[in-house]
Image (spheres, helix red, strand yellow):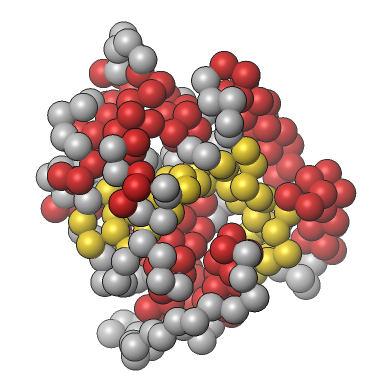
Amino acid sequence: MGKIIAICNQKGGTGKTTTAVNLSSYLALAGKKVLLIDLDPQANATSGSGLNKHDIKSSTYHILLEEMDVAAVVQPTKIPNFFIAPSNLDLTGAEVELVGALGREYRLKRALAKVKDNYDFMVIDSPPSLGLLTINSLCAADSVLVPVQCEYYALEGVTQLSHTIKLIQENINPDLKVEGVLLTMADYRTNLTKEVIQEARNYFKDKVYNTVIPRNIRLTEAPSFGKPIALYDKDSIGAEKYADLAKEVLGVSRLDISIEQSTIKPGE
């Protein structure tokens, strides 16, 4: 049975979607069958995985409204074993349309239960808010991975999320666990980054991944080409770090992967 990981932080700009796309791609390159569920109306995980979000007709919106099964929405990506349930702007209306629906928090959980045995991992890219979409994500998940940017006030936002996770555990999903805390956008030239990393490790203890994602221009560029970093620049420091994260998630010391690609230069 597959493992469902929700990637969640109510604050925007934490590297949440970057993590969802690149962790999914490296898990797939390691031979795991992976489904990325884009639950963000901005659909950045969809476009970052190589799909044109403006061409999407069947999306996670239709899954939540129970108009389509997951299998009818899923599309392949350019990486073998890496599939995506895409999003588009239609998802913006889902929270309003589901306001009076019975069991609205369980819509995604029920849908994923039908296909859970078909994948090794299902990764949910949650929106940067604590609304109904994120609650659906946390209700469906086995665990939650929290990206935290190495910036001032970052840990204060995580405190609010921790409270939400506790409420979900007490009322909706008692089996929900914290998969890990991922420190992102690290700039080791600043004392602030070092202080945030130390404070996070003191607060979250062994839940903090050893892998720290640095600020990296290639990671920033890759989504505009519709490619995960593994296909955009597999030799970049960003690619190396997301490969390291996949190792930690899998609990292995190395990944046996083969990436046949040519590095794309900006403007090509």
**Residue at 35% across, 44% down:** 116
* Image quadrant containing the C terminus: bottom left
In the image, 217 versus 53, the foreground residue is 53
Residue 83 visible at all: yes
In the picture, measured across the screen, residue 128 lies left or right of residue 62, that is right
Q: Position of residue 152 (x, y in %)?
A: 75, 48
Q: Is 164 left or right of 105, judged from the image as shown?
A: right
Indicate the quadrant where residue 257 lies.
bottom left
Could you say where residue 126 lies in the image, as x and y percent from the top left?
A: 45, 41
Q: Position of residue 62 (x, y in %)?
A: 20, 33
Which residue is located at x 34 percent, y 87 percent? 261
The residue shown at (51%, 86%) is 235
Q: Quadrant of residue 29?
A: bottom left
Say above or below: 139 vs 246: above
Question: Is 234 left, or right, of 266 in this rendering?
Answer: right
**Residue 233 coordinates in the image, percent (x, y):** 44, 82
What residue is at 43 percent from the left and 61 percent from the top? 24
Can the viewer see residue 125 in this picture? no
Q: Nearer the viewer, residue 196 or 161?
A: 161
